[in-house]
């Protein structure tokens, strides 16, 4: 440790495990692992050492059972965790192995240390990221057991109103730290799928993990800022940094108060149909905003943003980092990454000059034309999928041949990754945008191959009505409420229902307050909107009666033009208002 570095602002980048901003003094909890690893004992104390171990197991098991009782009314994530711990703790094979190590001349602490380490190797070596994170369970039980052996209670109360810096935090600790009132925590190890991270999120406690060496580089009492959105730890912030984050924290607080309970409430209709309300995002900041507003996931990542930002196609590595970060910030909620939709009115670098670009090499057509770009993107998405919360989506599909070529290509990329033993989620769902009339009409055939549909009403409207979405002269014609568009959507939704695949709407109509009832009535399962529209749309979803909405949608679709649809919907809304306005 170099004392000179203290006193200046230091930043550490880790993994965002639970969103929120915390500002306060650091409280440290470190363990001296090296000293514990190889303590030997004389043969005379072997029996008493074994007894000490048995007593510690009993005490900790008792402690877990007590916390189990306390947790009966807690989030349902807590109980299975405690069950897992108890199972590990009372595993007789494990206990016997530890006793054998004591008999060979190790102290109980070192025997526990070494045996848990050996067991952990198995989980750490596995390719399955979920199992790998289970290694953390072993760490948690081991730490508790060691504390029990040393007869040491971990002084949770000392961390009150502070930000905890630790190597790792066990879920049981976290429950005690939470009741002591810590502001947040930063750990050196852990995964976003670990139980502690899951709990931190359900406690709304900001947390950053994977901060290698950070805990050892912070002194107790130093002021730290924890940014659980970006996975950042700032130690000893400069005055201007402090002002900036205090402002953000205040903003977060104001938002929370303003929005009241709505961000935390589910997007359910009055008769109990759950609608997944997700966000369309362009940037990492959008992900943070969406999560803060309680989005159920990210329904559309417009990856073209990355091209626009860099003014070139990003490398596989750049994409991997970006997708991984989005997936981590949203975790455990799902994110849907759309493959580059270039061409048309979007970024057109590398697209040959075309007389009529909107009908040219757009979306999947461009990707199949520039396979090296498609390949680097697919590989990056798959590599980022290890936490299993990523879906991949193909844009602008209009023929079955395109869809099958896209799927074949993705299968080849998977094969290459597997051959090189690069981990990825082999079950990554691959879906398609429904944004051409052809895709809507052929949806029943496409649904046999696609894992999900997302209806892009912006393009579907432009292509159905032959009205350029960015041409003000045809703005009156370009209307997603036109029955021509609604009828195409209905074909796609019905096909999805028939084939039992999820269907979402991610075009702008999803964020229109007049559309929620109509779309739910059509049978749409998910809506994906800009983060700023999330709560307003949720408010409307919570007023909808899904059964009545079905009739409304049928009537709306029968209208003969867009004005008639709009008039019909607003008259129905006016009529429904008095009865429904009590529900928020
Ligand atoms: C759409 O077409 O509706 C859509 C969501 O995609 P984009 O607006 O990015 O073309
Ligand atoms: Mg589109």
Image (tube, helix red, strand yellow):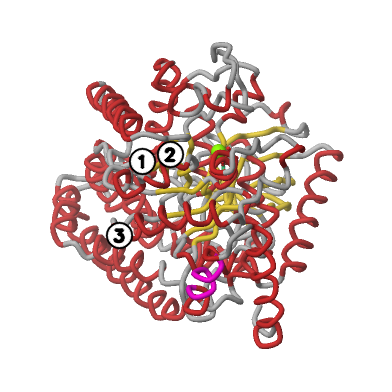
Q: Which mark is residue 430?
A: 1
Residue drawn at point x = 50 percent, y = 34 percent: 323
Q: Is residue 55 above or below residue 217?
A: below
Position of 285 with respect to 56 (left or right) is right
> Is 491 inside the magenta-drawn segment?
no
Label 1 near label 2: C-beta < 8 Å? yes
x then y, percent, for residue 371: 39, 17
Question: Callout 1: few (<14), some (14-19), or many (20+) C-alpha neighbours within 10 Å?
Answer: many
What's the distance in space between the residues labelled 2 and 3, CA to CA?
20 Å
Residue drawn at point x = 73 percent, y = 43 percent: 475
The earlier-in-sequence mark between 1 and 3 is: 1
Indicate the quadrant where residue 515 lies: bottom right
Question: SS at mark 1?
Answer: strand
**Nearest the camera: 345 or 147?**
345
* Most frequent secondary structure within the magenta stretch: helix
Query: How many numbered dots are placed on residues in this image?
Result: 3
User: Which stretch is magenta?
Assistant: 550-556
Position of 148 with respect to 17 (left or right) is left
**Residue at label 3?**
498
Q: Which mark is residue 515?
A: none
**Residue at label 2?**
393
Position of 41 with respect to 553 (left or right) is left
């Amino acid at each position: 440790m170099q004392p000179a570095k203290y006193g200046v602002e230091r930043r550490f980048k880790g993994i965002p495990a639970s969103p929120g901003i915390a500002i306060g003094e650091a409280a440290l909890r470190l363990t001296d692992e090296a000293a514990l690893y190889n303590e030997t004992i004389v043969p005379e104390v072997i029996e008493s050492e074994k007894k000490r171990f048995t007593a510690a197991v009993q005490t900790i098991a008792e402690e877990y059972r007590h916390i189990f009782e306390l947790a009966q009314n807690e989030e349902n994530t807590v109980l299975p965790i405690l069950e897992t711990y108890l199972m590990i703790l009372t595993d007789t094979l494990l206990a016997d192995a530890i006793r054998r190590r004591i008999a060979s001349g190790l102290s109980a602490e070192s025997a526990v240390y070494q045996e848990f380490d050996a067991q952990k190797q198995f989980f750490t070596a596995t390719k399955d990221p979920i199992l790998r994170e289970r290694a953390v369970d072993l760490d948690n039980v081991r730490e508790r057991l060691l504390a029990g052996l040393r007869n040491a209670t971990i002084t949770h109360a000392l961390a009150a109103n502070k930000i905890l810096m630790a190597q790792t935090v066990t879920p049981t600790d976290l429950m005690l730290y939470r009741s002591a009132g810590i502001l947040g925590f930063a750990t050196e190890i852990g995964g976003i799928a670990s139980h502690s991270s899951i709990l931190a999120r359900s406690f709304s406690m900001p947390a950053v993990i994977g901060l290698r060496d950070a805990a050892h580089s912070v002194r107790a009492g130093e002021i730290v800022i924890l940014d659980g959105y970006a996975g950042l730890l700032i130690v000893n912030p400069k005055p201007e940094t402090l002002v900036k984050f205090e402002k953000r924290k205040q903003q977060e607080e104001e938002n929370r108060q303003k929005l009241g309970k709505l961000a935390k409430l589910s997007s359910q209709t009055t008769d109990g149909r759950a609608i997944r309300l997700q966000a369309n995002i362009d940037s990492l900041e959008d992900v943070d905003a969406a999560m803060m507003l309680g989005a159920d996931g990210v329904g559309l990542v417009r990856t073209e943003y990355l091209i626009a930002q860099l003014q070139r196609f990003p490398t596989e590595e750049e994409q991997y980092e970006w997708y991984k970060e989005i997936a981590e910030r949203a975790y455990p909620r799902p994110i849907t990454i759309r493959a580059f939709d270039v061409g048309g009115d979007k970024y057109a670098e590398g697209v040959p000059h075309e007389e009529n670009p909107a009908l040219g090499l757009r979306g999947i057509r461009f990707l199949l034309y520039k396979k090296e770009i498609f390949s680097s993107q697919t590989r990056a998405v798959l590599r980022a999928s290890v936490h299993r919360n990523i879906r991949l989506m193909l844009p602008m599909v209009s023929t079955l041949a395109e869809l099958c070529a896209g799927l074949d290509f993705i299968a080849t990329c998977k094969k290459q990754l597997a051959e090189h033993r690069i981990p990825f989620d082999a079950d990554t769902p691959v879906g398609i945008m429904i944004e051409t009339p052809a895709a809507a009409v052929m949806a029943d055939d496409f649904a046999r191959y696609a894992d999900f549909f997302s209806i892009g009403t912006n393009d579907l409207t432009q292509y159905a009505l032959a009205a350029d979405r960015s041409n003000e002269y045809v703005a009156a014609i370009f209307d997603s409420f036109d029955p021509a568009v609604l009828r195409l959507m209905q074909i796609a939704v019905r096909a999805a229902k028939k084939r039992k695949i999820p269907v979402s709407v991610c075009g702008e109509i999803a964020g229109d307050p007049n559309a929620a009832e109509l779309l739910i009535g059509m049978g749409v399962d998910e809506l994906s909107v800009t983060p700023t529209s999330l709560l307003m749309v949720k408010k409307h979803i919570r007023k909808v009666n899904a059964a009545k909405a079905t009739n409304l949608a049928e009537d709306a679709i029968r209208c003969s033009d867009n004005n008639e649809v709009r008039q019909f919907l607003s008259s129905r809304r006016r009529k429904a208002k008095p009865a429904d306005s009590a529900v928020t």
